[in-house]
Structure formats: C-alpha cells, structure tokens
Amino acid sequence: MQFTNKQILEIAMQQSATDANCNAADFLQEENVIVTSKENPAARKYLSLPLACNLISYGNNIVASIDETYRPIVSDYISRFSVAHCFETPNLHVLNDAMQKEGLRVCFMAEYFLPDLETLKALSCPYELKLLHAEDFAPLYIDAWSNALCKKRAELDVLGIGAYDNGKPIGLAACSADCDTMWQIGIDVLPEYRRQGIASALTSRLALEILAHEKVPFYCAAWSNIKSVRNAIKSGFRPAWVEMTVKSAGFVEEMNASH
C-alpha cells in the first residue's frame, strides 16, 4: 500500500478518535468537543482508559475526553482560553488548580509527529546498520536503549534498526505496535556517538521500514525536548497533534519519585 500524507493524517485522527471515544471528524470542527472517556481494546496499548481528562488538538479545536464528573471544570477551561493557550502556562495552571481540588493533576504534555512523505528519505550513516526483529531485542533491554525499547511492554516491540561500530551497538531505533495501524518510534544513541547524524539516519530508515509493513510510523516528544524534536524534523517528521493528560495526584507523585 502506498500511503499519501492525507491518508496518514486520516489514520492518525481515526486512532485518536478510538482512543478518545469520539469521531475522527470531531478533530476538524471549529468548536471544541467534549466526550466521555471509555475503555476500548483498539486504543493505543499504553493508555490506561478511561481517563479523567485528556485534551487532544490537531490544531483546529480541542477534543476533551473525560470522566463526566469533571465536565464542568473542563468545559469552563477549554471555553475560557484559546486552543494553543490551553496547552501551556500560565493558563494550564487554571486547569491544574481546579483538578488538584479533586485529587488530580496535569501530568503528561506531549507533541506527536507524523512523517511527511515529501521529505522522508533514508539518511546516510557513517556506521554499519542492521535491521532487527523482535527475536533480536532480548539482550538490548538495558538502560542504554530504554527510549527505543520498553521492557514492560516487550511484546509490543516489533522492529528496529541498530547502528554498530565494529560490532558494538552504538545507536538503536525501534518501534512498538501500539495499535493496529500505527507503530511508535523510539530512539537512543550512546552519548559519545551523538551529533553525527546517527539518530536521524536510524529514525528515517525505520520510518520507511514501518511504511513498508503498511503501518503508519509516529513519533512523540515533549515540546521542551529540543534534541528529540530536532531529530523528528531532520528525520522527515512534522508536528501533527498535541495531548495533555490529567492523572491522579498519586500517579504524578510516583512519576516524580521515579526520576
């Protein structure tokens, strides 16, 4: 199957709709949309549904997938500020303050990228590259490759490309089959080998491999992770949508304690 950029965006919106329990067309509306968050076996595997509140925007509006308990808070918030401002300070403190009274806090803020087929191409790498499959990952579940691979969900790690210096692994891009249509890319390069174009070479080539498997590659980064965002852009990806997720205060505290 030969994808187009339009088809890739439509597939992403359909998956977001599955995750949020809405219609894909909701992301194209001028008005904000609020829907009830529900479990769905077709949702991205790492999502713990239902969610108290997840705000999603493809740039036109906000789709808020929520626990109905918090509809008044969320409705007031997304109607009070512009779309972009709802995802940044100082405005998000308004949502966080209201949610904190309910034992919840703003937790995850992420930007998601999709490949631009007019830009995506196999970038060169000064080191040997190898295509890897699930059976090759067993010895690679170590801290050095924790962005590329996830030991907790190892069964989802399906495909990767490694860079090697005289047989030593120095970089790894791998993807997880997070849902039926889309595979998420993660990337790691050893510190002493960075700034040589290894990350973008691995990312771009893995994206092409994913497309060859008739899946849509996607890439996620915190907006403040400049290195990761630069790699996404250099590799042929472009910003597609953003999400902000509210979780329990206990969950946020656990996240802070683990870093």
Image (cartoon, rainbow, N blue to C red):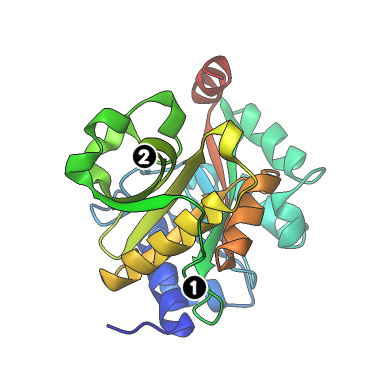
In front: 146, or 258? Answer: 146
Q: Is residue 62 above or below residue 28?
A: above
Q: Residue at x 27, y 45 (%)?
A: 157
Q: Residue at x 50, y 57 (%)?
A: 125
Crowd around label 1: few <14 · some 14–19 · many ≥20 (10 Å): some
Crowd around label 2: few <14 · some 14–19 · many ≥20 (10 Å): few
Q: Position of residue 40 (x, y in %)?
A: 27, 53
Q: Which mark is residue 121?
A: 1
Secondary structure of the residue carrying numbered label 2: loop
The single residue placed furthest to the right in the displayed view is 90
Number of labels in the image equals 2
In front: 82, or 240? Answer: 240
Disc 1 versus disc 2: distance between alpha carbons?
34 Å
In front: 172, or 240? Answer: 172
The single residue placed furthest to the left in the displayed view is 135
Q: Residue at x 49, y 73 (%)?
A: 121
Query: Residue beneath label 2, please?
Result: 48
Query: The disc labelled 2 sits on which kind of residue?
Result: Ser
Secondary structure of the residue carrying numbered label 1: loop
Viewport quadrant of the C terminus: top right
